[in-house]
Image: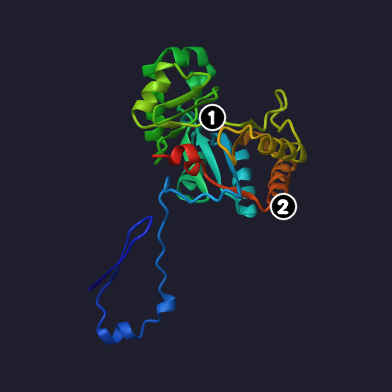
Amino acid sequence: MRNIFLSGSAAILVLLASCSNADLKKVNADSVKLIAKPIPGTPIKYDSSKRYIFLTWDDSPQPPGTVNCKNVFREQNVKATFFAVGFNQVGPFKKRIIDSLRNDYPQFLLANHSFSHGFNDKYAKFYSLPDSAYNDFMKNEKELQIGVKIIRLPGNNTWASKAVIHGQKAENPLIKKLDANGYQIVGWDMEWGQNGKQKQPKESATEMVKRINQKFEDGSTVEQNAIVILSHDRLFEKKQFADSLSRFIQLLKQDPRNVFETIDHYPMLQRK
């Protein structure tokens, strides 16, 4: 038996058992593929000439919207992050959606958006009970087997990483407790919002791309050359809106400066 160790973002042990020297000589090296599965959070090298786009979609699983978004991102070959909510995972189909998001890294990253979505959208109560809210995030992490300590607060645009905290709830005890326990909180630079009470995006693909370009030109993003876009799976349930999402990505890809990444590679989260 021979052991082959491959170093990198993930160590792989390949066992070649019961092979004689003669047998090994017959093995075509090109036919042996060693695949190292990337580990979320592994630092990347930034290119200052590029513009990094972080697509972050909230409230998964929400079929058919989640499935449509996944399919569009896969077809367009771009990376995206899904902030999931535990109490939306009801039944085997929705569980399979979450499993697929968790297993499809590095294209998709599964992150934490609380179990109850802020005690079922009762945000004032949620943030007034920091211990209960903290436990809600921990329950979500366990139930959905979320492998990264990255959180988006429900209904709140706050950022926190390694004691650097800013945003709407910067002084809230919940945020300080999450930060003290090694969790990183991600807000957003721009939202692709919902059109009133209708489950559809408010802006067109073209309008969104114009807004993004303006943000970059103004230098008004939280991090230089990086933009976090928030939207929700449910807005893309219908084919026409899934097509709009596809068009949105196609327009962004026309600019060679644009690079799509998962949120674990956001600059703030990579700093030591």
Looking at marks 2 and 1 on the same chain, the residue that comes earlier in the sequence is marked by 1
Look at the picture and state if 243 lies above or below 204.
below
Mark on residue 265? Answer: none
The picture places residue 91, in percent across and down from the top left corner, at 49, 37
Identify the residue under disc 1.
187
- The three-letter amino acid code for the residue at tag 1 is Gly
Residue at point 42% right, 37% down? 144
Quadrant assignment for the C terminus = top left
**Can see residue 135?**
no
Foreground residue among 39 and 137: 39
Q: Is residue 255 left or right of residue 18?
A: right
User: Which structural element holds mark 1?
Assistant: loop
Residue at point 49% right, 34% down? 89
**Can see residue 234?**
yes
Look at the picture and state if 128 lies above or below 185.
above
The picture places residue 193, in percent across and down from the top left corner, at 67, 29
Residue at point 61% right, 33% down? 221
In three-dimensional space, the C-alpha distance between marks 2 and 1, rounded to whole angstroms, equals: 26 Å
Residue 34: quadrant of the picture = bottom left
**Residue farthest along the bottom direction in this orientation:** 22
User: Which structural element holds mark 2?
Assistant: loop
Mark on residue 254? Answer: 2
Dot 2 crowding, Cα within 10 Å, few <14, some 14–19, many 20+: few
Q: Is residue 229 left or right of residue 92?
A: right
Quadrant assignment for the N terminus = bottom left
The picture places residue 213, in percent across and down from the top left corner, at 71, 40
Residue 270: quadrant of the picture = top left
The picture places residue 238, in percent across and down from the top left corner, at 71, 39
